[in-house]
Image: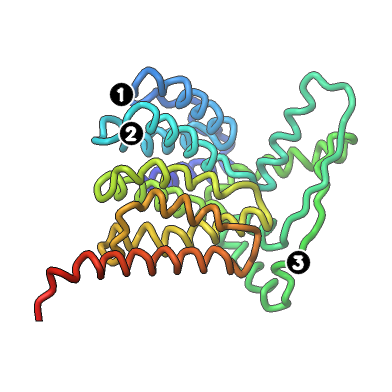
Amino acid sequence: MADRGFLSSLRYLFADFIGEDDDDTAPFLPEGLPEPVMAVASEAIHLLIDYQGPGYATLYVDRLRRFIGKRGVDDAMLGEIARLMAVRMSYEDPIRIAQLKLTELQGRSAGSVDVRKFRLEELIGALPAVIAEYLIDALEWLGWAQKRVSIRFSTASRYGIRRLKIEAGLRRWRLFSVRYAKERVWVERWLHMIDRSLTKQPQAAPAIIQTATMIEGYGDVYRQGMADWNAIIDGLAKPTFDGVLALSDLGGAVTEARAAAVPDPRQSALKRKIAEIRARATASAYVGGAPGRTS
């Protein structure tokens, strides 16, 4: 599925040179999609076309198709997968903020100014990886990668509007960016964890699906959410699916761990809670298996 996104990226890239636009044909809803999910999926398709283009919306449809008719996936669960996947695929980056700011011009007589704070590495991360990786390495060498800068998104002047259009125009390069590469990996891993849950521990699938809400925005909030998500998945979900951790109620454990996740770069409370949950599971497995042990 990642190949589709890459090929779509190539179309956007070459369109810049040969003056052609991306195919403007919107993808159809996937065959077999339950009627209660159609409105959510249709809205998502329109959102992603506006966000990146028809090719990107097609990638969304391809990903959603994996769960249609899958055992254990009812209409409500499929609807949540459809909704949350669209949210994550339309992640907030400087390009998206510029796009949304331009839409404010419609029906408004007066402009406005928004000031957002980004880390330098986030701004550079919106550029094609072939350029961004060298710049980020240089920033890290200088110790500036984590430096915060304020960026104005303004529709209050012609210059501000012109700059927004340039920034929004970078969407053609988004699929080559460092940030997109990370987001693509995350979405695929999230879907993979849902799929494994449906196979290994179906009752935990709703909790795994809802972990997508841990990641949002940009800056410190985004970094914290991503770090906490990885800690819970790597510390609880994956070991359970791999058979390394005997956790009978993974869904409850994920919910318990999420309650301990607070804004803390060191993740002290979350790490303690994960260790506590793992210790309880190990102790329960030992006690449960004790009578059957042989010397």
Q: Is residue 170 left or right of residue 233?
A: right
Q: Residues within 10 Å of mark 2 (few under 14, many from 20)?
A: some
Q: Residue furthest left?
A: 294
Task: Tell me what residue is drawn at x 49 percent, y 28 percent.
Answer: 45
Query: Residue 65 got which mark?
Result: 2
Residue 139: % across, % down? 70, 71
In primary-sequence order, the first of circles 2 and 1 is 1
Residue 53: % across, % down? 53, 34
Q: Secondary structure at mark 2?
A: helix
Could one spot residue 49 in this view of the protein? yes
Which residue is denoted by mark 3 in the rendering? 147
Task: Tell me what residue is drawn at x 49 percent, y 31 percent.
Answer: 54
Q: Secondary structure at mark 1?
A: loop
Could one spot residue 25 in this view of the protein? no
Q: Residues within 10 Å of mark 1 (few under 14, many from 20)?
A: few
Task: Tell me what residue is drawn at x 56 percent, y 58 percent.
Answer: 260
